[in-house]
Amino acid sequence: MNANDNAPALEFWFEFASTYSYIAAERIVDLAAKAGVRVAWKPFLLGPIFQAQGWNDSPFNLYPVKGRYMWRDMERLCARHGLPFAKPALFPQRSILAARLALALEHEPRCPAFVRGVYRANFAQGRNIGEHAVMEAALAEAGLDPAHWIARAETVKDALRAQNERAVQVGIFGAPSFVSGNEIFWGNDRLEDAVAWHAEVTRGAR
Amino acid sequence: MNANDNAPALEFWFEFASTYSYIAAERIVDLAAKAGVRVAWKPFLLGPIFQAQGWNDSPFNLYPVKGRYMWRDMERLCARHGLPFAKPALFPQRSILAARLALALEHEPRCPAFVRGVYRANFAQGRNIGEHAVMEAALAEAGLDPAHWIARAETVKDALRAQNERAVQVGIFGAPSFVSGNEIFWGNDRLEDAVAWHAEVTRGAR
């Protein structure tokens, strides 16, 4: 099946510091293509959303028992999906530059390649995505001009703030989230459900 | 396949006030039977575990955006699995009597029928499982003598406290959780993974 270019896209809301968003970013391209579903890549920042709930850190750090579970769960899931994984020394990493870059790239065909490269840097390659040099390398590896896109990232600061406000309005509280019309699906575990739902919407079956 | 009576059981840790535990309780019997896996039913209370994290209510009430999502997610999941569902007027409901009863019943063949009846009372039938009369009806519907088991529930108060302490020691922080040896699987979404893992352990493949 080919995606219908005129149909509304399934929105994939992701945070570069989010572990489960890594797995979803790796899986969504093939799953959506098989279902004939277009994907809109929506970077956002969980930090402001967590702060509004009274959290000044990742809940996986604030609640260490849950954090220990999450890292083991990531090991098992990545093994099952054949994804490389190495627990980063720093978590969560500062993701604002990566988010601005992904937003600047949202209409570029190479956006997904860049996004997946950033996730591998964070969760498989032991790099710190908060560093400019790491972002430049990720752009270059995705076939994108680093200097050009780093400059463009400076121009989307307000747009990223607006994107985050929209996330809150939609009812997003975590990452990854998938949005199809008024339906939100939260978590990598809901990716198949979200794609199936959106495929039905696209076909007019819902 | 028949479950091997000598093999260690997959531990199913559930809280009667937990929405996703309802779905897991309905699904685990068939899934485990098909995989030849024995299940040990482990009622516990999330309240003390949440209080130790600084929460004095369900996170779905403390974080209303997440709560709204959860109720919609429950609607979708119950529809998919063919389970009756009606959002209870009171959430979370007081589950200590139900938990004591389930612990008193842990070695009874009718324990799963009682557990599933309590979940349906809470999440499908608009009843309050904190009421003695509702528990007596659930016992009777499961073919169990209400007076006998209500009296027995009084004798397992310390045992339920010890069960909760073990949950904390194991690293459980939410419900449902499934425990196979040193592995914890959290959430109804992990039920298939937990059963498959435990089946491999039982066969000596892990």
Image (spheres, coloured by chain):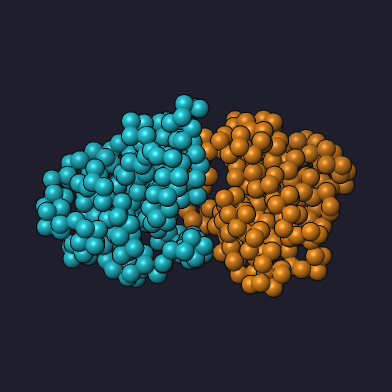
Chain colours: A orange, B cyan
Corner quadrant of residue B87: bottom left
Q: How many labels does the image show?
A: 0
Residue A27 spot, x, y in % from top left:
68, 47
| Left or right of A77 in this view: B142 | left
> Between residues B92 and A62, which one lies in front from this camera angle?
B92
Side of A152 relative to A174 (left or right): right
Q: Pinpoint residue B150: horizontal percent, then vertical percent.
A: 14, 55
Q: Nearer the viewer, residue A76 or A112?
A: A76
The residue drawn where x is 62% and y is 31% is A86
Residue B161 appearing in the image: no
Name the image quarter holding residue B10: top left
Residue A7 in sight here: yes
Look at 87% across and 42% down and name the residue there: A143
Q: Where is residue A50 in the image (x, y as percent from the top left)?
A: 53, 53
> Where is residue B155 drawn, in percent x and y?
13, 45
Residue A200 lies, with reference to residue B143, above or below; the image says below
Q: In which quarter of the image is the N terminus of chain B?
A: top left
Q: Which residue is drawn at 66% across and 58% down?
A: A195
Residue closest to the far front? B1
* Residue at 46% over, 29% down: B203
Task: Place residue A1 in its image quadrant.
Answer: bottom right
